[in-house]
Image: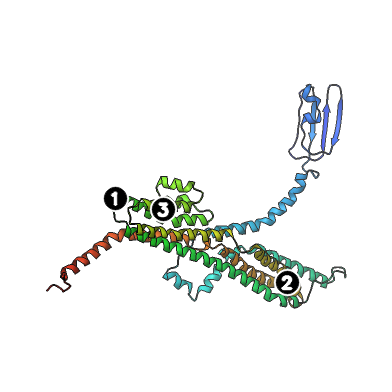
Amino acid sequence: MPSSSFSSKTLTPNLIFTRNDSTTRVSLSSDFTPKTLSKLHPTLSSKPRTTTSFKVLASSNPTNPSSSSSPSKTLISILRAIPDWADRIKERGMRQNRTLYNHEKWVDHRSSLRHVRHFLSSLSSRVILSLIPPVIAFTSVAAVIASYNSVVLMHWLPEFFPVLRASSLPYQLTAPALALLLVFRTEASYSRFEEGRKAWTKVIAGTNDMARLVITAVKSSSDAQLKKALLQYIMAFPVALKCHVLYGSDAEGDLQNLLERDELAVVLNSKHRPRSIIQFISQSLQMLKLEEAKRITLESKISCFHEGIGVCEQLIGTPIPLSYTRLTSRFLVLWHLTLPIILWDDCHWIVVPATFVSAASLFCIEEVGVLIEEPFPVLALDDLCNLVRENIQEAVASEKRIRAVLNAKRNIYSEQHSSNGHPNL
C-alpha cells in the first residue's frame, strides 16, 4: 500500500505505528527532533516497501534546546524594548538639523515664559526620553525595596528577614564626590563642544577669506570659467567636511548642486572627500594666471582647511577617556541602587518618588555631557554651509556693481582735480 502520514509542525511525544508486509512495529519515542523516514528506517531509502505510518505529534518540546531558550530570549527582547525605543528617539534627535540663532530667536530664548515652554515640551525632549529606561529601573528597585520593608515590618515574613536600612552618613560623605564628578564630566564635554565650534569658525572664516581673494585676484577673462569652478570648490569644502563628521549624511545630495557630475563622481569615490576637494582647489590655483605672490597667498589659505580637518577628526576619533565615563556611570548606578535603603528610615514610602527625582536629575546631567561630547551633531553645520554659499554668491553677483561704483568715483575725483593736485575751478 502507498504510505500515508499525518503530522503537525510542533512536536512532543511521538507515537509511530509502522506496518510492513512482514512485520508490525509500534514505537513510542520521546525524541522530539524532526526526523525523516529515511533516518528512522534506513532500509526505506534503498528498497521500497509498502508502509502505513501514523504520527501523533504534540505542541511542545521541553527537551529541545531552541524551545527552552525561547522564553529567555523573549524576556530579553521585552526588557530591551524600552531602551531600544529610547535609543532610536535619541539618534533621530541627533540627526535633526540645527539652526543658527537670529534676533527673534534670542528674544524668545530669554523670554520670561521660557520655563513654562520648556516644562510643557518635556515629553518631546530627546534628553528626557532617553532617560526613561534608567529612571524606570531605579524607581522600580525603590518600589521593590519599600514593599519588602513594609512586608517585614508587618510581620508577614519570618523574623530572620531583616529590614533593609542603613545610615545616611556614607551618602553625606560621597555626595560631594559625585557632584564634582558630574561637574568635571560635563565641563570636559563642553570643552570639546567649544573646540569643535572654534574649529568650524576658522573653517568658515578661511572659506570666506579665500573666496574674497579669488574674486579680487583673478581678473583675466580667459580664467573666468576656472574662477567660477574654483569658487564652487571653495563652497563645496565646508559641505564635504560636514558630511565627513556627521553620521548618516547624504554627501551626494548635498554636493550635487555645487559640483559637476564628473567632479562629483571623483569626490564620492575618494576615501577622504574633504581632501579630494582640497586637491581640486590646489590644482585650480596652479592653472590660474596669477602673480606668484598672489598664488602663494591663496595657497596659504588652504592650511586652515587642513587644520579644520585635523581638529574634527581628532574630536571624532578620541572621546573623553573611557575610564572617566565608566566611573561616572558606575557611581550613579550604585548610588541609586542603594538610595532607597539609605532613605528608608526617614522617608519610608517616599523613597519611591525621591529615587525618581534623584535619578531623573543626576542622570539628566550625565546624559547632557554624553550628548555634547560629540559636538558636531549639536552645531548648526547645515546653516553654516548655506551661509557660506550665500555670502560667496552675493559677493560674485555684486562684484561688477561695486567695481563700477568705485570706477565712477575715481573718474569724478580725477575730473575735479588737476594734475598738480589743485582742484579745477
| Camera-side mark, 3 or 2 | 3
Whether residue 388 sits left or right of residue 157 in the image: it is left
- Name the kind of residue labelled 3 in the image: Ser
Which quadrant of the rendered structure holds the N terminus? top right
- Within 10 Å of the Cα at label 2, are there few (<14), some (14-19), or many (20+) other Cα atoms? many
Q: Tell me, yes or no, if residue 291 can be seen here.
A: yes
* x then y, percent, for residue 358: 66, 72
At horizontal 21% and vertical 66% (from top left) the residue drawn is 410
* x then y, percent, for residue 118: 54, 70
Q: Which mark is residue 282?
A: 3
Asked whether the residues under the numbered discs 1 and 2 touch, taking CB atoms below 8 Å apart as contact, a structural biologist would say no
* Secondary element at image label 3: helix
Give the answer, above or below, for where 74 lies relative to 131: above
Front-most of residues 237 and 415: 415
* Secondary element at image label 1: helix
| Camera-side mark, 1 or 2 | 1
Asked whether the residues under the numbered discs 3 and 2 touch, taking CB atoms below 8 Å apart as contact, a structural biologist would say no
Front-most of residues 194 and 284: 284
Q: Quadrant of residue 389?
A: bottom left
- Name the kind of residue labelled 1 in the image: Ser
Q: Which mark is residue 339?
A: 2
- Gap between marks 1 and 2 measured at Cα: 76 Å
Q: Quadrant of residue 143?
A: bottom right
Asked whether the residues under the numbered discs 1 and 3 touch, taking CB atoms below 8 Å apart as contact, a structural biologist would say no
* x then y, percent, for residue 2: 76, 23
Counting residues from the N terminus, which is met first, the one under dot 3 or under dot 2? 3
Which quadrant of the rendered structure holds the C terminus? bottom left
* x then y, percent, for residue 236: 42, 54
Which residue has dot 1 on it? 222
- Within 10 Å of the Cα at label 3, are there few (<14), some (14-19), or many (20+) other Cα atoms? some
Counting residues from the N terminus, which is met first, the one under dot 1 or under dot 2? 1
